[in-house]
Image (spheres, rainbow, N blue to C red):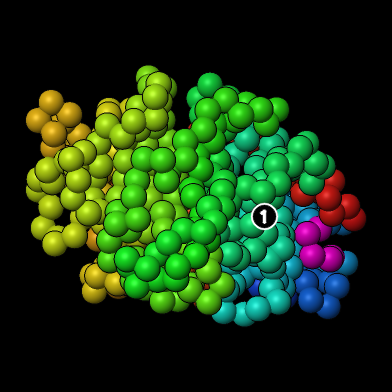
């Protein structure tokens, strides 16, 4: 039988007499539908600055289209849909329903391509337009195609954020003040915006949920009358001690560790002189700048100190430092193996323990004239070594900006927020790019946090947004 390809109206016949396959229905919006319509993609976003959108569709005999509750039709149709930011309408193609939600003008556009791995069904981002004052920061949850399903505005900055289980999300919002120490509130909310609890006076940089249900946060304690004259600083300065706290779900402090009890002023290394020069006017100085905490659940706590270019392993039982990776050399320093860089870290973020015992660290490379990188290390305490076993370098990701993070799943896939102002990427185990998000205008995602399977659902996010933004 000779193959035959005939295009006739909306019907495509493909080489088999009596068999016809309907062409896909066409759906367009003004303003545009993002991403372009595909029968395999359930959720979409658009803009609605005029209080409405115009939806146009052409269905087929087998797959008629219904827009916002209007009768289903296979003919061409156009419907004006009243819509305000945050609100959603639905359309149906045949028996399948699709969702379109209007994004607010203040939320930067996300241009996505590719697909996240199945282990990362939902990802929590932040979108902070630091170069355009007056715009709030946002926490945003996207699906595997990078489509925003849920968002929440913060004032004015959104930093640490975490899925808190079922229909709950924890988001820090506030402002960077007092020598880059974030002064704000960690808010635990349902996806519909209803408040569960708030923890005030928590630093911007960490909100991490442990497998036992406790939370790891960072606070700052001011230390006054610190004599910095030996370091060309003021005679009576105020410095901030970074304090790590483990808290119960109700907020009770279970464990605390003050960085200044275990590290010294000289541990700030190359950061010390510029911190003193830049912050001497207000006499408040952040010499450690703690920015992440994790635990193996077996007695070791891993802490990242950005202004020391170092990651510490701390024995939880007594707070003693077991090892130090990066930073100024000390008796606790590990010998670094397999790393080609002169300095191990430069203003690093997001140090995380992996199930196989390795540690991932996002290395910003701040002021080192080299690109940022996602790294993975194997610690050998018997030999006192740290071997670089994996590295992803983005050649154009030169970042002195605050933030950035790298997450690796058990299959070897990576999710990296590059902190360059525009980029979030996912990579497979061979470091091939499989997913991209580019912010449409300069914005920073402090981290990219995937939901564990079963931790949060698409329906909980959509229902929560509907309750906050009823039509």
Query: Whole-percent x and y of residue 216?
Result: 53, 36
Q: Position of residue 250 (x, y in %)?
A: 70, 28
Q: Judge left or right: residue 378 versus residue 320.
A: left
Instruction: Read off the residue under disc 1.
Output: 184
Q: Does residue 144 appear anywhere in the picture?
A: no
The crowd level at tag 1 (other Cα within 10 Å; few <14, some 14-19, many 20+) is: many
The residue tagged with tag 1: helix, strand or loop?
Answer: strand
Measured from the top left, where is residue 315 in percent x and y?
35, 27
Left-right relation of 93 to 2? right
Q: Measuring 37% from the left and 37% from the top, which residue is drawn there?
A: 302
Q: Nearer the viewer, residue 272 or 434?
A: 272
The one nearer the camera, 343 or 272, is 272
* Residue 316: quadrant of the picture: top left
Quadrant housing the C terminus: bottom right
Using the rendered view, name the quadrant where residue 11 is placed: bottom right
Q: Is residue 60 magenta?
A: no
27 and 112: which one is in front? 112
The answer to which quarter of the image holds residue 230 is bottom left
Residue range in magenta is: 83-87
Residue 237 image point, x, y percent: 50, 64
């Amino acid at each position: 039988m000779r193959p035959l390809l005939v295009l006739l109206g909306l019907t495509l016949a493909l080489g088999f007499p009596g068999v016809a396959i309907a062409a896909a229905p066409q759906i367009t919006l003004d303003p545009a539908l993002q991403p372009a319509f595909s029968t395999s993609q359930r959720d979409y976003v658009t803009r609605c600055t005029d209080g409405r959108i115009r939806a146009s569709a052409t269905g087929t005999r087998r797959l008629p289209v219904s827009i916002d509750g209007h009768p289903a039709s296979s003919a061409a149709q156009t419907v004006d849909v009243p819509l305000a930011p945050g609100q959603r309408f639905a359309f149906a193609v045949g028996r399948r329903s699709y969702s379109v939600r209007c994004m607010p003008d203040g939320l930067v556009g996300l241009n996505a391509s590719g697909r996240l791995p199945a282990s990362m069904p939902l990802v929590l981002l932040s979108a902070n337009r630091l170069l355009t004052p007056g715009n709030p920061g946002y926490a945003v949850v996207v699906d595997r195609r990078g489509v925003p399903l849920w968002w929440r505005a913060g004032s004015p900055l959104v930093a640490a954020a975490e899925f808190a289980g079922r229909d709950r999300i924890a988001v820090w919002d506030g402002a960077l003040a007092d020598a880059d120490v974030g002064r704000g509130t960690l808010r635990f909310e349902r996806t519909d915006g209803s408040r569960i609890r708030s923890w005030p006076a928590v630093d911007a940089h960490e909100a991490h949920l442990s497998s036992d249900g406790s939370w790891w946060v960072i606070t700052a304690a001011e230390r006054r009358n610190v004599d910095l004259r030996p370091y060309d600083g003021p005679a009576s300065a105020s410095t901030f001690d970074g304090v790590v706290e483990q808290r119960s779900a109700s907020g009770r402090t279970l464990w605390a560790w003050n960085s200044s009890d275990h590290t010294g002023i000289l541990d700030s290394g190359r950061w010390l002189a510029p911190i003193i020069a830049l912050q001497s006017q207000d006499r408040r100085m952040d010499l450690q700048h703690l920015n992440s905490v994790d635990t193996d659940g077996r007695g070791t706590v891993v802490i990242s100190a950005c202004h020391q270019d170092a990651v510490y392993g701390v024995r939880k039982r007594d707070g003693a430092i077991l090892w130090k990776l990066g930073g100024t050399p000390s008796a606790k320093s590990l010998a670094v193996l397999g790393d080609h860089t002169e300095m191990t870290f430069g203003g690093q973020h997001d140090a995380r323990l992996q199930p196989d015992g390795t540690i991932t660290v996002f290395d910003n490379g701040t002021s080192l004239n080299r690109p940022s990188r996602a790294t993975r290390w194997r610690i050998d305490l018997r030999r006192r070594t740290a071997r670089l076993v994996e590295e992803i370098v983005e050649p154009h990701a030169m970042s002195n900006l605050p933030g950035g993070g790298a997450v690796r799943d058990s299959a070897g896939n990576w999710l990296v927020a590059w902190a360059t102002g525009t980029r979030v990427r996912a990579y497979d185990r061979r470091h091939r790019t499989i997913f991209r998000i580019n912010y449409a205008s300069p914005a920073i995602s402090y981290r990219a946090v995937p939901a564990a399977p079963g931790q949060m659902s698409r329906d909980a996010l959509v229902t929560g947004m509907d309750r906050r933004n009823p039509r």
